[in-house]
Image (tube, grey):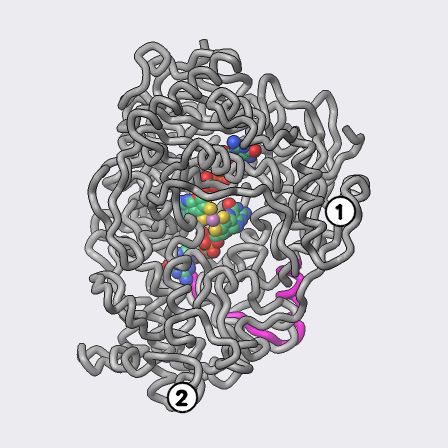
Amino acid sequence: MRDNPSSLTHWGAFTATLADGEITAVTPFPGDTDPSPLLGNIPGSLRHPSRITGPAVRRGWLHDGPGPTTARGADEFIAVSWEELAELLAAELRRVVDTYGNEAIYGGSYGWASAGRFHHAQSQVHRFLKLLGGYTFSRHSYSLGATGVIMPRVVGTHDDLFKRSTEWNVIVEHTDLLVCFGGVNMKNTGINHGGTTGHPAREALRRFRDKGGRIVSISPLRSDVDGDCQWLPAVPGTDVAIMLALAYVLATENLADRDFLDTYCTGYEQFERYLLGVDDSEPKSPQWAAGICGVDAAVLTELARTMAAQRTIVTVSWSLQRLRHGEQAPWMGVTLAAMLGQIGLPGGGFGHGYGSMNEPGLPPVRVRLPSLPQGANPVQTFIPVAAISDMLLHPGETFTYNGRTLTYPNIKCVYWAGGNPFHHHQNLPRLRRALARVDTVVVHDPYWTPMARHADIVVPSTTAFERDDYSGSRNDPLLVAMPAMAPPYAQARDDYTTFAALAERLGFGEQFTEGRTAGQWLRHMYEKWSREVNFAVPDFDQFWADGLLALPVESGLTLMADFRADPLAHPLATPSGRIEIFSDEIAGFGYPDCAGHPRWYDPVEWLGGQRAECFPLHLIANQPATRLHSQLDGGAVSKNAKIQGREPLRMHPADAAQRGLAGGDVVRVFNDRGSCLAGVVLDEGLLPRVVQLSTGAWYDPLDPSDPDSMCVHGNPNVLTDDVGTSSLARGCTGAAVLVQVEKFDGPLPPVRAHRPPVIR
Ligand SMILES: Nc1nc2c(c(=O)[nH]1)N[C@H]1C(S)=C(S)[C@@H](COP(=O)(O)OP(=O)(O)OC[C@H]3O[C@@H](n4cnc5c(=O)[nH]c(N)nc54)[C@H](O)[C@@H]3O)O[C@H]1N2
Ligand SMILES: Nc1nc2c(c(=O)[nH]1)N[C@H]1C(S)=C(S)[C@@H](COP(=O)(O)OP(=O)(O)OC[C@H]3O[C@@H](n4cnc5c(=O)[nH]c(N)nc54)[C@H](O)[C@@H]3O)O[C@H]1N2
Ligand SMILES: [Mo]
């Protein structure tokens, strides 16, 4: 182990100082000009009291055997040896496979886990379950559930919208106007899946403004843009109405680029009938939109004219598709950009996710990264990832997805490694009831997360800092060595070691390990990769000694520039080869909640509807500024932001005054699905009637035996609706929810989420 080892996380590279097996301080990577504050959660994380010290089995499961139970989350655990754990777990997997078939194992196992190309938990669990004979899997992500289905149908890809997005440098050079639906929030650009060694977004925006560039931010939160911008505080959930109004001005004032629409798009005519209200007698005019979104019609009209007169990028943040009808915002965003006719021109067109992740705006790496071979899954059954509770509660029932009718399998075993459904899923009371229906829940995690507490079999994993690995991501120029900093804590083991032992017992040890130790796999993956790539790569020992390897990148990209230059030579991968403003296929599905062209649907969870009469505040449940999801929620940066130990709820002073609340008060946030406590922070930079409570506080029910119990810590997913974006994608709808807020007067219950459960 090195003295001052360096490593990589999803939020940045750093060098650590260690004492007694614990990280005591971190120094950001010197090349990173805007390091993420999240690095401050790392010190103290190796020996945090919430670490899982050894294998454990839920008492009821150990005594009564597998089966449905409401005790999950409330029961005690019994410490077992690794031998016992492996024997119990292997026998249970064998039982489920022999009795019900491999389809009865849900191995969707969604989640971000840690950076690292080999020890990546998803890659390990999926490889293991494939060799076991397969598992029911999940498609897409909580990040981009709607985009992942709609955008391939509209522009032939979803990945390239981020990976091959218009580079920041091109924006600085060529763009006049950034019209940002959902802002460009710098807190989110801290993150990149797999790791990131630089954070250029803030500096790029500074240079953009210095050159005279302007930002219009359509968002309920002023803080979604750092610094100067025109802020249009629109009623949340109404972005599609605003985009339609802008499109209406372009169409009716002869500002739409008809040549572009004719040459590069299909179906504009059908869309325009809707836009102008030919069939429904409702023109989608600025006056119409103003009544929905609360932004003045004249302001919208003026904005549309400016957009047409200048080099403009329309950006849509990912949050806008994490809502009911979430397919519409990215589809309508592209349609609006198409009408401006600047798609594929430097500094014009469309962007999806600037300010959602570090990746958009960064040049892509020209080579794939080293990876663990995955093999095929013999089981074909899958669900859209956010349908987990639906699946567990409705086995055998059919559902629609992307033009198909599929059937929910009958799951007996849920296997999780590297994710936290009690962070990511909506309507946690419903999730608890869903998890109660299966025979066995297995969780691998370094920490006693709420998901681990709801498991029957708990497998302690190492953290990324306790094993050798390397990592990188497709829009970061460095492959970074991640040498172990400390030995595994207590009895924790690498997921690879656990799976190798299980595979051995189950008779496919050799296939799983291919006879390699973890160290040999690292070398093997690297060497195989270095033979496949077309640039000079040092040998593994040299890379390991250097700690870093520069990868070739493709600079100066403009999204869809090839298509723009020659649409016949570079057609999009859509049925028409063009941008599908109207999709015959989607229209053919006949879905009531996703038509053949983008359109406005009245939301349910919004301030303009009936539900707001009972729950009059629109809660934005966005990504936390103080951590990545639920990871290291017990770290210093995360904890320092809490109020009396609760997650902060930002609120406009007027809304607080109406309820007799002051900054620092603890409040109960509730609706008809659930409730949680939170600590009030007053903030004038919110549209009144909007409140904001980030995700990520570990779920902490006052009465763990009651699925409807209040979360005393502030997890907004006790409130969110688990409905899915539409019949097309069934993406996650966690971005926002209607609530009411009242002062919490009772004795303040302790937050116990970061303490381990009772283990005998
Ligand atoms: N209401 C609402 N809900 C949301 C969202 C929202 O905006 N609003 N956002 C959604 C989005 S975009 C996402 S991506 C999801 C994120 O949801 P998740 O990805 O599930 O959240 P994380 O907290 O990152 O969970 C990762 C887990 O992996 C564990 N881990 C780390 N390293 C290892 C390892 O080596 N081995 C193992 N076995 N485990 C490891 C961590 O301790 C942690 O418990 O949340 C979604 N949920
Ligand atoms: N610090 C930090 N950064 C992260 C993450 C994290 O956990 N922590 N998670 C990462 C992940 S996995 C993902 S997928 C991305 C997600 O990226 P996003 O989905 O873009 O992130 P959010 O923070 O949920 O939302 C961005 C902003 O959208 C605005 N917004 C919400 N609803 C509406 C609306 O109806 N209309 C408009 N116009 N604006 C609205 C909110 O004000 C919010 O601050 O973030 C990544 N970045
Ligand atoms: Mo995400």
- Camera-nearest residue between 430 and 709: 430
- Camera-nearest residue between 485 and 669: 485
511 left or right, relative to 59: right
646 left or right, relative to 346: left
Q: Which residue is mark 1?
A: 548
In the image, the residue with mark 2 has its CB under 8 Å from the nearest atom of ligand 2: no
Circle 2 sits in a helix, a strand or a loop, which is it? helix
- Camera-nearest residue between 719 and 662: 719
In this view, the residue farthest toward the bottom is 254
Quarter of the figure that contains the C terminus: top left
Q: Which residue is mark 2?
A: 258
623 left or right, relative to 74: right
Q: Which residues are magenta?
A: 200-220
Q: Which of the marked residues, 1 or 2, is nearer the chain's N terminus?
A: 2
Residue 70 in magenta stretch: no
Quarter of the figure that contains the N terminus: top right
Q: Quadrant of residue 89?
A: top left
Circle 1 sits in a helix, a strand or a loop, which is it? strand
Q: What is the x, y in percent for residue 281?
A: 18, 80
Q: What is the x, y in percent for residue 726?
A: 28, 56
For badge 2, the amino acid type reads: Arg
Q: In the picture shown, does residue 667 fall above or below 613? A: above
Q: In the picture shown, does residue 420 fall above or below 488? A: below
